Amino acid sequence: MAEDRPPSRRRFPPWRRKQGEGRRRHWPIRSAGINFALGYGVLFLISATLFLSFIWWSSTNLLNRHVRAFIETDAQELQKRWTYGGAPALGDAITDRLEQNIDDDALYLLTDRHGRRLAGNLPGWPVAIKRMDHFYELTIRRYTFTTPAEFKAYDLPHGFRLIVGHDIRGRTLLSTVITRTVIWCAVMIALLAVGGALVVRDLFRRMVGSIARTASAVASGDLNHRIALTGSETDLVAETVNTMLDRINRLMEGVRQVSNAIAHDLRTPITRARNQLEEALFSATSPEELRTAVDRAIGDLDHITGIFEALLRIAQIEAGSRRSAFTMMDLNQLLANMAELYEASAEEAGLNLHLDIVPLPPLFGDERMLQQALANLLDNAIKFSPPDSALTLRARPVPAIAPPGHSPSECSPAGLEISVQDQGPGMNDADILRAHERFFRAESARNTPGSGLGLSLVQAVTSLHHGRLTLTKANPGLKVTLFLPLTQDAEQTTRKAPLTEGPS
Amino acid sequence: MRILLVEDDPTVRSFVLKGLKEAGHNVDQADNGKDGLYLAIGEKYDIIILDRMLPGGIDGLNILETLRGQKNNTPVLLLSALSEVDDRVDGLRAGGDDYVTKPFAFSELLARVEALGRRGHNESAPETSLTVGDLSLDLLSREVRRGGQKIDLQPREFRLLEFLVRHAGQVVTRTMLLEKVWDYHFDPQTNVIDVHVSRLRQKVDKPFETAIIHTVRNAGYILRPTQD
Ligand SMILES: Nc1ncnc2c1ncn2[C@@H]1O[C@H](COP(=O)(O)OP(=O)(O)OP(=O)(O)O)[C@@H](O)[C@H]1O
Ligand SMILES: [Mg+2]
């Protein structure tokens, strides 16, 4: 089903792809800085509008309640006047009030039973007002302008009627102010957004710039260029990229080393095989001689194949592809079996293999690789030891540094230490430093068989387990130690441990 | 044994073909996946040797998977230039019975082919004892006797001898011993296996007149029963 798609698209899950394409089609702006500023501006505008709307709504509400309360109390007062003095008293009161009303916002109308106006500043009974005891909001004409006003009408005895009202021009004013504010806000936000966009874009550019410069330097071949750390958020990326570059550098270095080594170290056996065959071809006098020469050439070819295999295996391990074979494994069993396998060889070489093994907790690792590493160490020890000497295979858990107040035995071990120690010639400091290099063999090892790849593989396996390989002088002899941390895959360990161990 | 060899490289093919014929086997060959699959399905073989990489769309793994999909359990030995552990695991997971990486020594291939063929034959009822010539192994009490004389063996030595006895008359290589007796899949660099075999010989051969464990030059070991 995936075959008919172009291969480059396969990497994305379908939902990602759809989203990605959709956004590209509808949204033309690519600059992250501008998008950021735009988004920020829109967000700010929306929140400002919401905020001002709320102010508008609550203040008009307050205003309204205020006006209505005022109308109610005023009407009560006026009705009281009616009870004392009837229509004339009420009329006087209204006129009084109108005279004292400096804001010129009070509206009154008193009519008799025929609807004639007795007092007040309204020209006539507004047609809209039909019910008593109900608030109306109407637009009325006053002098030269129209204005909204709040009214309430009251029935008085003998068919007299009273309207008390209030000009609410203030609300219009408020709305104008708020609208203006919104408009100004929009303008200012737009300006800020544009300015911000430019600043943010510049910032982004500057942050990405140093990464880009390094990347292009690397792309054009300068693998030693690194991104400068500035203390900003991009340092996270910068550090990761730098680590990546370090790793690439190391891998490249490895490749270079290997190709040099191949050029040098593989030529020797190939040349030897070739010479042997050629010589046999020209000067062998009997089939017997010919056969011996071919036989030896096959031996050389096998040796070359062996070197290739070892090189490939190291390269594979260093590429990190072998972590797929990691499982929870029992190192105790592995050590016992390896000791059993090599004990015979040691004995044959006149050596005594001592075991000093403290039970180890399970480790998350690659069993075959660790077998191979251990085999290489034992092989070296046996190979370089003089007869009648002793060999020791040690293993123990290494406690973590205990927090204050706890004894080291209380906390779980930080790792494991496996070491192989012999009483052979040992190595000098300069050689120890180079021991893990591919094809490195100390001068004194020239007359022993080997190709100098054993410790390189051990080093690769140790790194694969995030461990450490150390060579120390044991005087006499050499002690090679593998430290394998337990914590690095604590997650897997805890997740898988119940599966392998089960309830007991 | 009737063997099918599917391999595209003409040199390797004729080399293997010649060797197998000399060893007395009846070999059919194919140089591409299509013919190989056709033969593998149509004919009955004791063993199929499959190159993993074949030209023309059908490769060794495809053939293997098709066979296994048809419940055809003919032992299959995979040949490959890929030596990555994952490739090996892939091959075995697809139903392969053994795996040999190129370049290989013919003796290694032959030993494995014969071991596989043998396995196809005697998968009968579980035995409780093995007898070869004057040597007998009791698999339950783990007791070994030769000519009526009891031989004391370490557990690993017993397993080594058991493997040799089970493949009596066949060459077994050092790698096979390491894989099948020790269950190790690494390259031991030195002659660790030789040392174990020579220890075994000390106990099984030395005290007696005739030796039954023999070294085959450039190949491995063979356990040949004494004729009498
Ligand atoms: N136990 C040891 N005692 C003294 N020197 C050692 C010991 N182990 C390693 N060396 C030195 O380190 C060198 C590199 O060791 P390494 O195992 O990588 O290669 P090798 O053993 O020479 O060859 P190979 O392992 O590929 O067969 C050796 O050649 C030897 O000089
Ligand atoms: Mg070595």
Image (cartoon, rainbow, N blue to C red):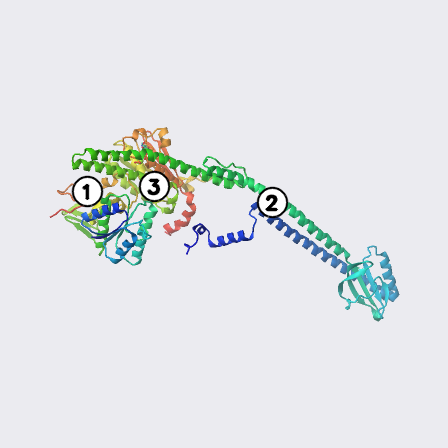
Q: Which amino acid does the dot numbered 1 rest on?
A: Val
Examine the image and state in which quarter residue A173 appears: bottom right
Mark seen at residue A137: none
**Residue at the (37%, 50%) spot, across then down:** A500
Q: Which amino acid does the dot numbered 3 rest on?
A: Arg
Chain letter, disc 3 residue? A
- Report the Cα–Cα distance between label 3 and label 1: 29 Å
**Residue at the (23%, 41%) spot, across then down:** B196
Whole-percent x, y for residue B171 in the image: 20, 46
Whole-percent x, y for residue B191 in the image: 25, 39
Where is ligand 2, by quadrant?
A: top left
- Are the residues flagged by discs 1 and 2 from a single subunit? no
Mark seen at residue A197: 2
* Residue B74 appears in the figure: yes
Q: Which amino acid does the dot numbered 2 rest on?
A: Ala
Q: Is residue A194 left or right of residue B32?
A: right
Whole-percent x, y for residue A196 in the image: 62, 44
The label nearer to you, 2 versus 3, is 2
The residue where tag 1 is placed is B216
- Are the residues flagged by discs 3 and 1 from a single subunit? no
The residue where tag 3 is placed is A313
Badge 1 density bin: few <14, some 14–19, many ≥20, Cα 10 Å: few
Q: Is mark 1 within 8 Å of ligand 1?
A: no
Look at the numbered disc 1 and give the secondary structure of its residue. strand
Chain letter, disc 1 residue? B
Examine the image and state in which quarter residue A412 appears: top left
Look at the numbered disc 3 and give the secondary structure of its residue. helix
Badge 3 density bin: few <14, some 14–19, many ≥20, Cα 10 Å: many
